[in-house]
Image: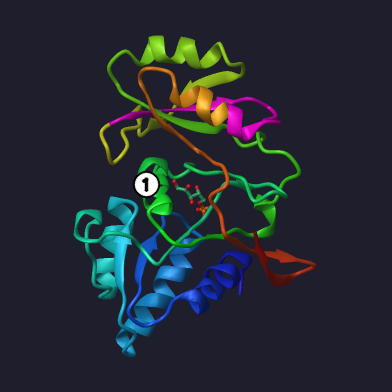
Amino acid sequence: MNEKQLVGEKAVEFVKDGMVVGLGTGSTVYYTILKLGELVKEGLKITGVPTSLATEKLAKELGIPLVTLEEVDYLDVAIDGADEVDRNMELIKGGGGALLREKIIARASNQFIVVADSSKVVETLGTFPLPVEVTSFGHAITKKHILSLGGTATLRQSMGSNYVSDNGNYIYDVDFTEIPNPEALERALNLIPGVVENGLFVGMADKVITLKNQKVIVKEK
Ligand code: 5RP
């Protein structure tokens, strides 16, 4: 079993009958969703809230009942991947482009569980370019304001055109090299007009499921 599958499947241990579950996006939480699909077929009663159109499609194919955020007051748990996790359990997310819905759903959840293989664990965030979702309107000006905070920014591309998120926005991948103060940067970015959200998830993760010395571990806050 590969690392993504090991950590992804471990997360289902925290899902119980009757829960409303945020379903993340990406190749690690994919294994969580596959396992949940199996358990639903065996009788587990859960309701999922997908963080992307891709996850919505997958969950529907697996027969996981879904609701929208408008139909629930809160979620019991959200499970999602990450692009980087530091030792304080701060995260960079959004490599898959779903950061806005992922952050809304994580914030609406009583518990946020991150599944991350050992390659995602870093000392300091920032080697992975930070995804920043921006409105297409005025995006070049928005980029200039982002760059006033440092780094270099690349407008994400997909099949020869500007990548468009599920929310109809563009994404700049911003290479800051190192992010020593994720909280300050998260706030500063979100104060820029045109920035919709950024991929820093600060103080949000309750558990990180990863591997140490080839063993699955669950780090808690
Ligand atoms: C999508 C995300 C993903 O959780 C993140 O990119 C990790 O993906 P993967 O598990 O495929 O490495 O934030 O927006």
How far from the left and from the top, in percent, is residue 46?
31, 76
Quadrant in which residue 155 is drawn: top left
Q: Which residue is drawn at 58% across and 16% down?
A: 149
Disc 1 residue lies near ligand 1 with CB under 8 A: no
Q: Which residue is drawn at 57% across and 59% down?
A: 206
What residue is pinned by disc 1?
Answer: 104
- Which residue occupies the foreground of this view, 103 or 119? 103
Please name the amino acid that badge 1 sits on.
Answer: Ile
Whether 208 is drawn above or below 201: the answer is: below
Disc 1: CA contacts within 10 A as few (<14), some (14-19) or many (>=20) = few
Whether 187 is drawn above or below 111: the answer is: above
Quadrant in which residue 197 is drawn: top left
Q: Is residue 171 magenta?
A: yes
Farthest-out residue, bottom? 42
How far from the left and from the top, in percent, is residue 147?
54, 14
User: Which residues lie in the magenta part?
Assistant: 169-184
Q: Residue at x 65, y 63 (%)?
A: 220
Q: Residue at x 34, y 53 (%)?
A: 51
Whether 212 is drawn above or below 201: the answer is: below
- Which residue occupies the foreground of this view, 62 or 220? 220
Whether 5 is drawn above or below 160: the answer is: below
